[in-house]
Image: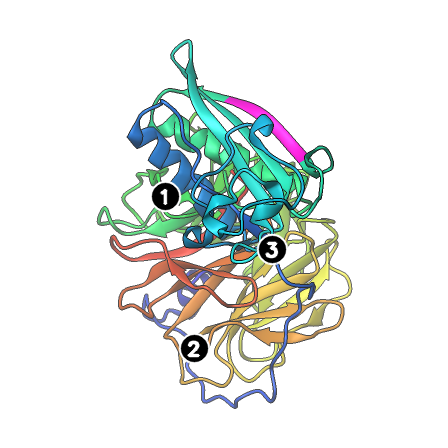
Amino acid sequence: MRISAAFLLLFSVAAVAQHAVAQQRPADITGTVLNEGGQDPRIAVPDIRGLVGTDNERAFNNTLWNDLESSGRLEMVPKSLYPRIAPAKPEDLKSGRDFPSEPGARGLWLNGWAEPPTLARYLVFGSLETQNDRLVLNGYVYDSTQEQTTQAYIFGKRYYAAMDKMGAEEIAHDFSRDILMNLGLGMGLAGSRIYFVSDRTGHSEIFSMDYDGANVKQHTKYQSITTTPAVSPDGSKLAFTTYAEGTPKIFIHSLETGRRLAFLNQDASLNMTPSFTPDGKSIFYASSVTGRSQIYQADLDGRNLRRISYSRSLDLDPNVNPRTGAQIAFVSDVSGLPQVYVMDADGANVRKLSGGGGDAVQPAWDPQGQNLAFSWTRGFEPGNYNVFVINVATQKLVQLTHGAGRNESPSWAPSGTHIVFSSDRSGGTQIWTMTADGTQPKRLTDQGRNRTPIWASR
């Protein structure tokens, strides 16, 4: 878990030990802290065809479908309910409701997609072609409930990419993002990356992967304990904690060049758990420079150190509000057991958010800076964590995971629609995602043990 290394170092307990305390089950934790809107709009996404090769077509269509489905904002109409043919260009579409009575023959009538059995609000269509050895997508989105095709047009765009599988996936990601944005449904998950710690090479190193687990890349090779990754808001820098030089220190790498950047670690037994400010110009982190672990802020080179917390306890794992930068969530054992607190960025107005009765750790803000996800042992057998979300303003609390092993290190998708976390529900600890209401769990990793994920926009 994210906080454990510091607590283990300071209290000299075993490398995998956690606080273990008898718990009481919280009463009536139900509901959701997220905005409760209506039913997700239904969208039909028939396969887009062209003379670009079967593999490229398959890669494009699979990626487009997965991106839209994974957004958590749309109800995907099963392809088994589609008409037999679909339009390839706007000129193919016919207006009006004078379409064939047989559903499978309605594909060129716009309103035919809005009728049973498809019942789609939106229709995605287009064509794939080659041009000067490049892959070209002509993609369109129409509102299939409109009577006239001229009124139904939402957007259309031409996309270009390399003539290979990677290029096909690239334009599918671009098209899916534009679909979601033009429907007012946010940015989706396409293009985002999950950074995580894995021991698949024999040592704890930092890797990243696409939101769906594809395209895994290794970022560190220190052959030591390397953990708690953090990514700058612009996606250019990776900060983390490593024991490569003995005591835990903060290293920062450029994600553009892969090189280590200069960072002055304080002369302390630990410097760890970095968190970037929204402007990307400084970090908050935990350091024992004054004797016990407290929260500090420093410039990106480690200079201009400013102490933020002043407690007689152990304060660790700061997480900066990504929306405002005005609040810091962190973990402190001032009440005896580690609990989640928030304070102003200058250290004022400290207040506890978790209600006690177990270990509450690893706070993570949602992109809007309104809710915190965290791991908590309250109400469960000693050592077993579950993921909870609390609204900071109202303190409304929701439990997202239930009785499926240890569920730790939650981190929000940039879209705010999903949460990534680590879990041992399938045996060894792996990276999982779920929607922000705790549904649709999906396992992403299967090599080695994988933990402490962070979801970044790229």
The numbered mark at residue 343 is none
Q: Amino acid under label 1? A: Phe
Residue 270 vs residue 181, the one in the foreground:
181
Residue 287 vs residue 196, the one in the foreground:
196
Residue at (60% x, 37% y) in the render? 141
Residue 380 quadrant: bottom left
Main SS category, magenta section:
strand
Point out residue 348 in the picture as x, y percentages from the top left corner: 77, 61
Q: Which residues are magenta?
A: 154-159
Q: Can residue 389 be seen?
A: yes
Q: Which residue is mark 1?
A: 207
Q: Which residue is mark 2?
A: 19
Q: Is residue 237 left or right of residue 425?
A: right
Magenta-drawn stretch contains 379: no
Residue 2 vs residue 140, the one in the foreground:
140
Q: Is residue 209 left or right of residue 140?
A: left
Q: Amino acid under label 3? A: Asn
Residue at (42% x, 9% y) in the render? 132
Q: Which residue is mark 3?
A: 319
| Lower position in the chain sequence, tag 3 or tag 2 | 2
Point out residue 168 in the picture as x, y percentages from the top left corner: 40, 29
The Cα–Cα distance between marks 3 and 2, rounded to whole angstroms, is 21 Å
Q: Amino acid under label 2? A: His
